[in-house]
Image: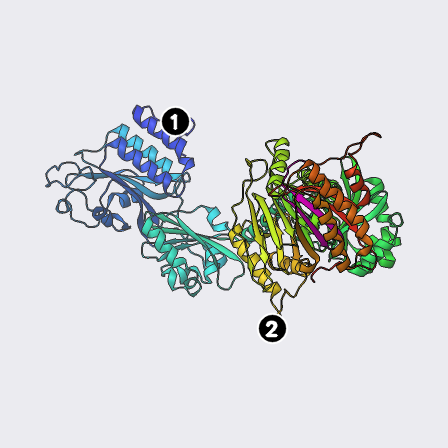
């Protein structure tokens, strides 16, 4: 360049310090600019240093015999129009300085008075300088210097419009020459057109283009403000399918190949916003994708068209790889979460089958673990049943692939059946039955202990990349840890279930008063053990206690507490306590367990002699009664708080139930869930009971069924089927106890009031022997006489009236003597010299069972005797 960019101070010392500073700025910044940026920078520095009104740079176009304006600064548009194109015949200063190769000064017109400088907007009023070729603002002159390349060729002119009467001084002229010399480094003479398309070189809108533009593979087009093509490099001409002579000067959108590319719309956006714009498009007649970028320039627009087919392919591949990786990461995250939630071995196997196989494109899975020294297949997926049977019939030690995995504790990857057969010929006989074409054998190691192995199978031959191998190995570790945890859970859960089953009744007793059935439903989804329980307890006088309860919470501790409560209820029931008092004692027991223990309980006593049902509830769902006619209802009763939170006394309720009714006791897990509140659940229970007890549709209408058509067991199954379908999962355990009531035949229950005093014993003996004769139980008369005498005599001596004798002929012969005293009789050891004190010893010896219970008016002492073999209890069917 004319100015040493590294040492600008080496320029002529005649120029001013500010001029030297401007040259240094040009030297440092010019290399960082593109397009017309360098020449516009130089023009701006020249105008500023000279204090000129504006400046221009023209470039020669020998082919057309003209000079074209490529940059201007500080001049209004109506003035610039007259300077855009100057012919070789013009006398304007830019043309003259190129013609003579030296600086040319054109002074202001002599007869025009000096005018004020241009306004801050760079414009003077229109009337000050009417537009025309080479016109100047009034009072201003123009100085032009030629732009000469290093080889001495004039390629253009640098001009400045100044308001001075005389020529510039030497320093200003020297600075202007040095700027023009610097500009010459960025301008090249335009090349003449060639006839051969492959060697065509055309000027870019009159601007000069480096040789790199002509050799580039990307297309480069230049448009003027009318979208006319002013330049096209060879690559662009190939895309257009036209020669330079055919293309230049035409409107780009008239070319058929451009019409359908969408370039016109993008051109409109770039022109409107005066900002770069671009888009990807298919190019008509060519495969692949192209990107067209539109960059506005002062005199039009430059379009850069690049083939991006390879880039798009790489982006698509990268995007696909990213999606695959993201899907794998997502699947692995889902697997990790699923394994963390998996409780049982089957849960783990299902999680692996659902989460591991899809992201790897796998189709088969086999998991085997060691249990008690034996190999057990804990899960499989995708393998034919015939192949699984074959694998299970072969010893693991006879399969070399598995032996290698177990002995080396390292995975094996087999990409094809041929590779498998070559490395492990023992598998040739059954390999084809698997349906797989590639395999990953993975050891399962947890806590440094080998617990088994798993095989992931693929339906097609597969190359295992390093990423595949790393992920599968990492997954085998996760699966091993989850399986080991699940096996421990399964073992503990099995033991806990066995404990719970041991705490619940193995079977309900067969009693004359009721026919009963029960069901227990453990919670699904791996929930811990619950505390739901039920029981059926025989009482004296053929009465029966039905009890159901629920220890709040889940776990082994709750199951053990349930067992303790069940034992306590049995003990308290043996004391013949009424329901309200029994719950009061049970409440004390639960309270002693701690503040964190609560339980609900419903205790019911049914008397077949009176058809009365007494019950009390501690926070438990209410008793349901299914009448013989098939209608269900809930006896009104306000439940007291749960055990452990209640303050006795509890309220006791009494209802009469017709023979053939069903007493239905249940826990909240049967009628309540997150989706169904307990009130709605009770309505559903009532409907289920009614539907289950309804007579068949083909039953004649004139046939009156006195009792429901189904037994308690069938009724239990129907209710559970209606409330807990098989496909539903219960999140709480549930218990159901249904008992169908029976009454003692009225002629098998007799009762007499006895007189006060010693005569009562004789009256009791007479009544008893007479009734036994009627019932055909004469064999029991002598024993019964003795029992009645002792019981009545005991009342006469130690208690008070009124006395009453009752005989019940049921599964045993029951003798009951009641009185108005609350004194509890007890057996004591009598001395040899004592005349009394042996009455209860005699009662205990003569009866099979005996006991005492309190009544509303006092107490009752009862005895039971086994019936003679031919005798049968008379209880209403």
Q: Quadrant of residue 528?
A: top right
- Residue shown at 35%/53% (left/top)? 269
Q: Which residue is mark 2?
A: 697
Q: Is residue 396 visible?
A: yes
Position of the C terminus, as image quadrant, is: bottom right
Decide which of 677, 793 is in the foreground and name it.
Answer: 793
Q: Which residue is mark 1?
A: 8
Q: What type of secondary structure mainly makes up the magenta span?
A: strand
Give above or below for 36 relative to 312: above
Q: Earlier in the sequence, mark 1 or mark 2?
A: 1
Q: CA distance from mark 1 to mark 2?
A: 115 Å
Decide which of 357, 637 is in the foreground and name it.
Answer: 637
Position of the N terminus, as image quadrant, is: top left
Q: Residues within 10 Å of mark 2 (few under 14, many from 20)?
A: few
Q: Which mark is residue 69?
A: none
- Magenta range: 802-823
Q: Position of residue 68 (x, y in %)?
A: 31, 49
């Amino acid at each position: 360049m004319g100015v040493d960019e590294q040492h600008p101070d080496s320029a002529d010392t005649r120029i001013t310090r500010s001029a030297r500073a401007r040259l240094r700025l040009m030297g440092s910044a010019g290399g960082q600019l593109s397009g017309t940026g360098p020449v516009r920078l130089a023009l701006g520095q020249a105008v500023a240093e000279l204090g000129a009104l504006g400046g221009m740079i023209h470039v020669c176009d020998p082919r057309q015999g003209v000079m074209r304006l490529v940059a201007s600064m500080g001049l209004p548009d109506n003035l610039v129009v007259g300077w855009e194109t100057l012919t070789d015949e013009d006398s304007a200063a830019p043309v003259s300085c190129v013609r003579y190769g030296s600086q040319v000064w054109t002074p202001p017109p002599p007869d025009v008075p000096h005018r004020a400088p241009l306004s801050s907007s760079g414009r003077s009023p229109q009337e000050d300088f009417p537009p025309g070729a080479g016109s100047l603002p009034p009072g201003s002159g123009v100085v032009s210097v030629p732009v000469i390349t290093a080889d001495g060729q004039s390629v253009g002119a640098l001009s400045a419009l100044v308001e001075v009467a005389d020529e510039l001084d030497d320093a200003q002229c020297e600075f202007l020459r040095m700027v023009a010399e610097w500009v010459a480094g960025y301008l090249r003479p335009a090349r003449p057109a060639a006839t051969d398309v492959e060697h065509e070189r055309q000027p870019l809108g009159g601007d000069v283009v480096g040789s790199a533009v002509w050799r580039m593979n990307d297309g480069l087009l230049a448009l003027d403000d009318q979208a006319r093509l002013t330049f096209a490099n060879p690559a662009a001409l190939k895309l257009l399918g036209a020669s330079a002579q055919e293309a230049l000067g035409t409107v780009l959108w008239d070319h058929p190949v451009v019409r359908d590319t969408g370039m016109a719309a993008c051109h409109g956006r770039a022109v409107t916003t005066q900002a770069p714009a671009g888009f990807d498009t298919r190019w008509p007649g060519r495969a692949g994708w192209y990107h067209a970028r539109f960059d506005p320039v002062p005199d039009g627009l430059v379009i850069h068209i690049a083939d991006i087919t390879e880039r798009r392919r790489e982006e698509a591949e990268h995007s696909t790889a990213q999606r695959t990786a993201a899907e794998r990461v997502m699947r692995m995250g889902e697997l990790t979460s699923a394994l963390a939630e998996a409780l049982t071995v089957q849960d783990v196997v299902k999680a692996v089958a659902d989460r591991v196989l899809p992201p790897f494109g796998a189709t088969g899975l086999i998991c085997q673990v060691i249990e008690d020294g034996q190999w057990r297949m804990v899960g499989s997926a995708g393998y034919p049943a015939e192949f699984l049977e074959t694998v299970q019939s072969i010893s693991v030690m006879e399969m070399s692939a598995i032996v290698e995995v177990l002995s080396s504790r390292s995975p094996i990857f087999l990409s094809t059946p041929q590779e498998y057969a070559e490395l492990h010929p023992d598998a040739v006989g059954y390999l084809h039955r698997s349906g797989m074409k590639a395999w990953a054998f993975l050891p399962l190691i947890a806590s440094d202990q080998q617990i088994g192995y798993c095989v992931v199978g693929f339906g097609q031959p597969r190359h295992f990349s390093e990423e595949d191998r790393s992920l599968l190995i990492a997954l085998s570790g996760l699966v091993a840890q989850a399986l080991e945890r699940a096996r421990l859970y399964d073992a503990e859960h099995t033991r806990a279930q066995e404990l719970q089953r041991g705490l619940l009744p193995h079977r309900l007793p067969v009693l004359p008063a009721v026919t009963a059935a029960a069901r227990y439903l453990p919670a699904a989804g791996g929930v811990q053990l619950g505390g739901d329980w039920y029981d059926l307890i025989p009482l004296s006088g053929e009465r029966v206690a039905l009890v159901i309860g629920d220890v709040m919470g889940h776990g082994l501790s709750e199951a053990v507490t349930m067992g303790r409560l069940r034992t306590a209820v049995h003990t308290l029931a043996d004391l013949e306590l009424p329901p309200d008092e029994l719950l009061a004692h049970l409440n004390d027991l639960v309270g002693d367990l701690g503040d964190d223990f609560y339980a609900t309980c419903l205790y019911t006593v049914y008397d077949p002699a009176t058809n009365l049902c007494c019950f009390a509830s501690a926070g438990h769902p209410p008793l349901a009664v299914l009448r013989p006619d098939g209608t269900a209802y809930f006896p009104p009763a306000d439940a007291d708080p749960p055990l452990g939170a209640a303050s006795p006394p509890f309220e006791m309720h009494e209802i009469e139930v017709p023979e053939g009714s069903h007493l239905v006791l249940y826990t909240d897990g049967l009628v309540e869930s997150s989706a169904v509140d307990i009130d709605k659940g009770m309505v559903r229970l009532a409907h289920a009971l009614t539907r289950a007890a309804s007579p068949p549709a083909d039953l004649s209408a004139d046939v009156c069924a006195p009792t429901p058509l189904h037994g308690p067991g069938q009724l239990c199954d129907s209710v559970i089927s209606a409330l807990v379908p098989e496909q539903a999962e219960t999140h709480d355990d549930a218990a159901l106890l249904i008992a169908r009531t029976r009454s003692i035949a009225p002629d098998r229950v007799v009762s007499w009031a006895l007189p006060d005093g010693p005569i009562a014993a004789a009256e009791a003996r007479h009544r008893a022997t007479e009734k036994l004769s009627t019932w055909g139980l004469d064999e029991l008369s002598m024993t019964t006489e003795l029992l009645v005498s002792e019981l009545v005599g005991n009342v006469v001596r130690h208690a008070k009236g009124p006395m009453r004798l009752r005989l019940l002929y049921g599964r045993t012969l029951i003798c009951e003597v009641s009185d108005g005293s609350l004194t509890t009789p007890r057996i004591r050891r009598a001395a040899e010299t004592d005349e009394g004190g042996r009455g209860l010893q005699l009662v205990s010896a003569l009866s099979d069972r005996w006991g005492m219970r309190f009544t509303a008016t006092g107490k009752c002492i009862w005895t039971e005797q086994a019936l003679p073999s031919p005798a049968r209890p008379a209880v209403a069917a």
